[in-house]
Amino acid sequence: MLPAAAMSAILGGAVGARPNDRSNGKTECIYEPVAGVSPYVELSIDWGGGAGAMAGVAMLGQREPGIASPYDGLGDEAAAIGPALMIRSGEDLVTIVFSGVEDAPAKARKIFDAAKAAM
């Protein structure tokens, strides 16, 4: 995933990186603040899970209109549901969960671009 220094530069606050090795079929890293409670980001890549996740988002949107907010121009397809941003990139799903992050849309783009380069 992204080194802590790279994520810290994007977020504008010092974070440490902790891989989540319990994820099955995913690569996941949790970025927690060095001091305080924010910024906090979870970044995961679900290898091969993009199409299924976006189909689920579409079904949820039909059942609960307005629950998902589309993000245009990010990956092949993207939508936010609460604090989670789900981005389909080819066959894969990149998920970014934010807490205490200002200007999340701009930072999401930088995180996605950096993650995509590392994939």
Image (cartoon, rainbow, N blue to C red):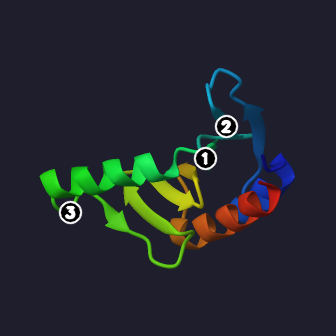
> Considering only order in the chain, which callout, 2 or 3, is on the residue closer to the N terminus?
2
Marks 2 and 1, how far apart at CA: 11 Å
Q: Secondary structure at mark 3?
A: loop
Q: Circle 3: is it few (<14), some (14-19), or many (20+) Cα within 10 Å?
A: few
Above or below, 119 relative to 40: below
Residue 99 visible from this viewpoint: no
Which dot, 2 or 1, sits closer to the camera? 2
- Report the side of 94 relative to 54 (left or right): right
Q: Circle 1: is it few (<14), some (14-19), or many (20+) Cα within 10 Å?
A: many
Q: Nearer the viewer, residue 48 or 24?
A: 48
Marks 3 and 2, how far apart at CA: 28 Å
Marks 1 and 3, how far apart at CA: 24 Å
Seen at 72% across and 56% down, the residue is 13
Indicate the position of residue 54 as horizontal and vertical percent values: 40, 54
Seen at 22% across and 57% down, the residue is 61
Residue type pointed to by label 3 = Gly
Which numbered tag is attached to residue 66?
Answer: 3
Seen at 61% across and 25% down, the residue is 24
Residue 65 visible from this viewpoint: yes
Which numbered tag is attached to residue 28?
Answer: 2
Image quadrant occupied by the C terminus: bottom right
> Considering only order in the chain, which callout, 3 or 1, is on the residue closer to the N terminus?
1
Above or below, 74 relative to 19: below
Which numbered tag is attached to residue 41?
Answer: 1
Q: Residue furthest bottom?
A: 73
Indicate the position of residue 34 as horizontal and vertical percent values: 75, 40
Quarter-wise, where is residue 111 in the image?
A: bottom right
Residue type pointed to by label 2 = Glu
Seen at 20% across and 63% down, the residue is 66
Indicate the position of residue 98 as horizontal and vertical percent values: 52, 51
Residue type pointed to by label 1 = Val
